[in-house]
Every structure is written in structure tokens, then in C-alpha cells.
Image: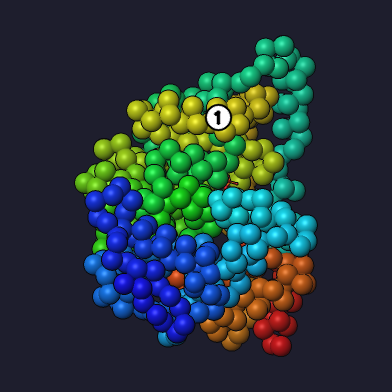
Amino acid sequence: MAKKAAGAIIPPFDQLSGKVRVPLHRQVYQRLKNAILGGSLAPGVRLPSARTLAGDSDVSRNTVEIAFAELEAEGFVERRVGAGSFVAAAMPDFVGKPLHARTAKTSTNRVNHSLSERGRRIKAAAEIDPTATLAFAPCMPSLEAFPLQTWNRLTARRARLAGRDLLGNGDPAGYRPLREAVADYLSTARGVKCNWQQVVILSRTQQALNLSSRLLLDEGEQAWIEEPGYLGARAALQNAGACIIPVPVDEQGLNVERGIKLAPAARLAYITPSHQYPLGVTMSLTRRLALLAWAKSAGAWIFEDDYDSEFRYTNRPLAAVQGLDSAGRVIYAGTFNKVMFPSLRLAYIVVPPHLVDAFIAARALADGSAPTLAQIVMTDFIAEGHFSSHLRQMRALYHERRDILLDAVARELAGSLRVEAAADQKISTQAAARKFHIPPLSRYYLRNRRAQPGLILNYAGTPPKIIRRTVRTLATIFQT
Ligand SMILES: Cc1ncc(COP(=O)(O)O)c(C=O)c1O
């Protein structure tokens, strides 16, 4: 039966069917989204509670909650602590008008109208950040400390020797000696259990996430992500049409028990166990084992993003979850773009043997293969010992920068460190105006009501003088 709430017509839920292949939460999601797109749920309108909607139909409250979370993730619904759920006020301007009324008035509108729904999601999710070169820019290593002369020398030597075979298409799985070197490195440094055939060279971790989401999940299937968590993982899964289940992170990492309560039949769990992004905690061994046990019994995949395990300063990192897996459920991903330099565009994925062919095929379709010369030079850089000595130097440098940052924060910001809820966004905006980039922690939460305020200071790529100066400026922002 249609339900009226604060002037809103909620689509009838009595025709939902457990018999069709589309999961119930996806059917609820689709009905609500159709109503929003069709205009019967106007921007700003308050939605009934999940409990009420579930009570009026034959679905559980959890089913409605999942649908709400998905709509929130895509920007169709806003959830406000203590006030309930609302149709987002800032819908694209054609939403709510019949198709024939969607005439483009401006060129911006025309561009929007030509995009698919997925296209609009991709456009909204891509973080093309104009402040990315500013102080504290995320994912930025120290470029001035990179041994550029060595890299140039290795590149020149290979370029001089290059034959025409270098000009053809590369192997979509990657240059074999690099795959072997990565397998060696991962088994020694990270406890990963694999042979070189399981390693596929990619351009970025983001590519590993995109390929995995598309290869392993069907539209509407559930995937756990960490809450708060990496926006790149969220975007890849959303773009593949997955239903995102945010699972809280505590001091032991992803709360596996909560995940199992929220979505026991999820198909994939995305984790950053070595160094949770953005909170920095390490996933405990108990949780790692619990996650593996769940994945085995549910037939689910674990996507292990080991994006910066190289940079532990106090103790050795725990070995990778992949090395503890006896059931072949883990997809392991790592990147050279952070430990070397971002424009290198070389990353890697380790997949269970029976998935190798599918990943190679998907990579070939996505963008062919990685540039051969860069792969060869990277292999030389590892084989001649430059990689391990670069890692050692960077570890010492970043450790020092972290101490400088902590010291500056303790001196300049002592007493100002309590950031009120929602204030982190404001401080972050004021900081961007002063040319430094400190994203608000609240942005990394999918559920607003869980969001903790905070500020993320990426110190690795920022020289000490600028760290100190920026923290002093931050103190003045706190005081205004
Ligand atoms: C959690 C996380 N994963 C992966 C990466 C690396 O991503 P990519 O190789 O796609 O640049 C980053 C960026 O620093 C990150 O923060």
C-alpha cells in the first residue's frame, strides 16, 4: 500500500518479492530511488523511519536500513542525527521533473544529462583535488628525497639497450621478471604466500579495486567497507553497483562481529589491516582470524589493501592476512606509487590461482598493460638493492617528520585539540584557503551519525619547515 509521510508518497512495498534474483534491500532501494527520480518524493522531504517502513511491509528493518544506507551513499538521502532521514535537498536539478521537462538550459546541464546514472556516480566520486600539491597533500611521498639520479641512470641504460621488442604490446599480466621480484619481496617482507604467476602488475591500487569489484560482485550484492574508510574503495564498489555495508572500526581494526551481524552474506570485505586508513590502527590477530573464518564459511572475498605497510616506525608490521589464509579467499593489493613516486603508475595484485586468468583478461580489457620500460627499470631498481635502501631511508625520514609534527602539534595546538562535531569540515575549508590540505575525518564516514570529528595531517611529503609553519597557521585558525 502507498504510504504518505510529510507529504511524501512512499512506493508500495507489498509487491516486493523474495523469489526474484534481486535482493530485497535492492528492491526497496530501487522503489525509493524511482520515487525520488520520478518526483513523488521531493527534495527535502522527510522519510518515514526504517522501522515504520519495515513494519508496513514484509521486510526486516535491517533490509530497509541497508537500502537507506545505499541511497545515502549515492547522495539521494541525507540522514541527520536525531532528526531522521530526508530526501537530499541538493538533487540534480532535473530530478523530480518528467523526462520531457528535462531540457538543458545551460551547457553544464547538457553535460550532466548526457551521463548515465553510473557516470554521474563516477563524476561525483572522483577526487580530482586542485589542492593535491599543497602542504599535507594526501598520498604524497617525499619527492625531493627520491634517488632521481639513480632512477635516471637505470632508465638511460635500458633505453640505450632497448630493441624494437620494447615497442610492442606488453604482457597484460606484467613483465615477468617484475612479477617474480614482487612475489619474492612480498614473501620475504610481508609473509604473502604466492608464486609469481599469481602476481598481476597494475597501474594503481584503484585499478585493483575496480577490477575486483567488477569481477567478484554482481549488481546489488553486499560488500563490507571500513567505517571510517578509504574513499577510493567506496567509489570502486559503488561504481560496480555493490551495496555498501559500512562496518565500524575500533582499536582492533574492523569489527568482524558487527559485520557478521549487519550483513552475514556479504560477498566481499575491504580492509587495510596493516595501517587502517584513515585511523591508523593495526587489525588484531584475533580479528584477522575471525575475518578469515567468516570469509571461508560465507564464501566471501577479502580485499587486503596493504598500501603502506613499509612505513612502520616502532615495530615490525604484522604479516599480511593473505599469508594466514588457507582457503584462497584473499585478494592482496599493494602499490609502488607511494613508496617510489606517484607518476610511476605501477602497482600489483596477488590473486588466488583460479582467478588469475580472469584478472589478466579484465586488465587487458581495461587498459592493455603497464608500460614495459617502467617495469624493466623498476625490476632493476629492486634487483640492484636500490629499492630496499630507499625504503630504509624513507622510513627514517618519515619517522623524523612524524616526530616533528607531533612536537609542533603538542606545542602549538595544546588545548585546542578538541574539534567539535561538524567543525572539522569548517577548519578544513579554512585551511585550504591558506594553501594546505587537511581533510576532515568526518568525510570518511558513510553514516553521518557515526562520524567522529578530526583532521588528517599527511606529513610524509611535507618538509619540516613547512610542517612547523603550517601547524602554527592551524593554531591561528583554531583561535578564530
Ligand atoms: C588506503 C589507500 N589505498 C591505496 C592507496 C594508493 O592508491 P593508488 O595506488 O591507487 O594511487 C592509497 C593512497 O595513498 C590509500 O590511502
Residue that mark 1 sits on: 365
Query: Would you say residue 319 is visible in this rendering?
Result: no
Q: Residue at x 47, y 67 (%)?
A: 35
436 w.r.t. 395: above or below: below
- The residue sitting at 53% across, 31% down in the picture is 363
x and y percent of residue 427 in the render?
Answer: 66, 78
Q: Residue furthest left?
A: 297
Where residue 158 appears, as percent x and y from the top left, is 72, 20
Helix, strand or loop status at disc 1:
helix
Give the answer, above or below, for where 324 lies relative to 24: above
Above or below residue 354? Residue 69 is below
In terms of image quadrants, where is residue 337? top right
Q: Residue at x 27, y 52 (%)?
A: 265
**Amino acid of disc 1:** Leu
Q: Is residue 41 shown above or below 304?
A: below
Q: Is any atom of residue 428 visible in this view? A: yes
Q: Quadrant of the N terminus?
A: bottom left
Q: Please name the residue shown 55% across and 29% down the image.
A: 365
Determine crowd level at label 1: few under 14, some 14-19, many 20+ residues with C-alpha closer than 10 A.
Answer: few
Along the viewing direction, whichever of 189 and 400 lies nearer the viewer: 189
Residue toward you, 229 or 100: 100
- Residue found at the far front of this picture: 100
Q: Is residue 407 left or right of residue 164?
A: left
| Residue 251 location (% of width, % of height) | 38, 67
Q: Is residue 412 left or right of residue 395?
A: right
Q: Tell me if 3 is positioned left or right of 385 in this view.
A: left
Q: Quadrant of the C terminus?
A: bottom right
User: Left or right of 470: which side holds 8?
Assistant: left
Q: Position of residue 194 (x, y in %)?
A: 38, 30
